Amino acid sequence: MKGFTKITAVSLSAAMTLSMAGCAGGGASTTSAAGSTTADSSKAVSLELFSTKTENASTLKELIAAFHAKHPNITITLSSPQDAGTVLKTRLTKDNIPDIIAMGGDSTYTEVQSAGVLEDLSSESYVSGIQNAYKKMVYDVQQDKEQKLYGIPYATNASGVLYNEDLFKSKGLFVPKTWDEFIALCKKLQSGGTTPFELTFKDSWCTLPAWNSLAPDLQPANFTDDRKNGKTTFAATHKEIAQKYLDLLPFAQKDYMGTTYADGNTAFAQGKAAMMINGNWAIPEFKKVNSSFKVNMFAFPSSNDSSKNYVTSGVDVLLAVSSKSANKEAAKEFVSFMMQKENAQKYITEQFAFSAINGVEQNDKTVAGVKEDIASGKVANYPDHYYPSGFDLASLAQNFGKNAAAGMAADKNIADFLKQCDTKYDAANVSD
């Protein structure tokens, strides 16, 4: 599903318009009426925008071109290599930080932010328009949870339960609000000859959406910090989560360990199962198979207390500026441009994402079931965003599912899995 390496230069031709600006020369910054610092339009500036997502390159190129039309003296080159996280970490060790970085709010961001190379953008005027829930997600992954924004949350995503609307309607089914209702729904579907879930565990990352939906709702409130500091373990706190994870598997198609993400998407879009546990990013893949497929989402009902069942939603893209950039003010100008509502709306519409900006909403009806929760901030971040970057939970969860498919007793499977989680976590946590 990954794209190929793309290093794209955008809008070069008009960059040398040194004579058109009327303000004082010398490359000095100016200050707007709103108090934010703006780039001097008399100075020709070249910036690099480094993106860790190859998938958004076309949208970013269009936005860069629109920015350039308004700021013809500023030329921005987009870089979005494969394995961008590794590339960025390597550049960090060489003190070669891009002027602007667009990346996820995950452990790679934590590494970059903790190195002290990002500009504090907390005082920028657009910050007041960002949802507090997503600001907090950024704070929570920063070193010592510092309450400043070195990365501006921009685009977000959502994970939960995708369901076939026509199938639900034809069988008179309702969206479950609690765990018991969820299991009762699965039993009803299965007894009626319909496969409740299409799972795609041949691709290890596909084992994570269920975990990432269960854990935020059911783990202890301070688990992330306590686990990092060695004060608790997965084995002591995650038995219910692991048990519920196993409880779902008998409701999947028989060959869930041998089904790829692509094959599962095709099967689901063809109506071969009622639900998938994954994220909004899968919906365009369904539409490629069946353009008339009616799909929607609901928050994974992990608990019997519906107030605790959050939509799992994380910062898919945040925007940061290098504190070492020779052209920080121009870089800030671009971030400010991106935060304008019309540009943020263009991004989430084209990328089928959600926005961290108040009043910028994803209006596609296929995600209507989670839209209200996201807009109101009833969201919880992906727990794996807080795990050490070397902790490969996906492989552990894949083996967990494989053992279940092979008939291993649940108690032993759970005990072995959680023990492995602790062992591998500790091995990866040594540098934190």
Image (cartoon, rainbow, N blue to C red):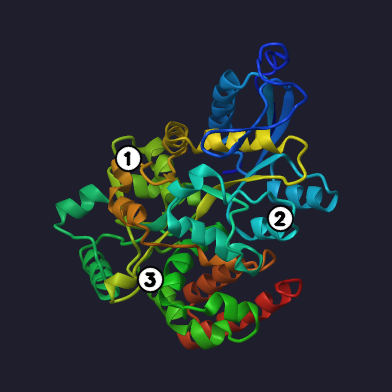
The quadrant in which residue 303 appears is bottom left
Q: Residue 73 in the image: state x and y as whole percent.
A: 68, 20
Q: In this rendering, does residue 356 appear at all?
A: no
Vertical comparison of 321 with 186: above or below: above
| Residue displayed at 55% across by 86% down | 235
Residue type for callout 2: Val
Label 1 neighbourhood size at 10 Å, few (<14), some (14-19), many (20+)?
Answer: few
Name the image quarter holding the N terminus.
Answer: top right
The foreground one among 417 and 387 is 387
Label 3 neighbourhood size at 10 Å, few (<14), some (14-19), many (20+)?
Answer: some
- Report whether 52 appears left or right of 411: right
To which residue does mark 3 refer? 248
To which residue does mark 1 refer? 364
The mark that comes first in sequence, 3 or 2, is 2
The mark that comes first in sequence, 1 or 3, is 3
The quadrant in which residue 108 appears is bottom right
| Residue displayed at 47% across by 32% down | 343
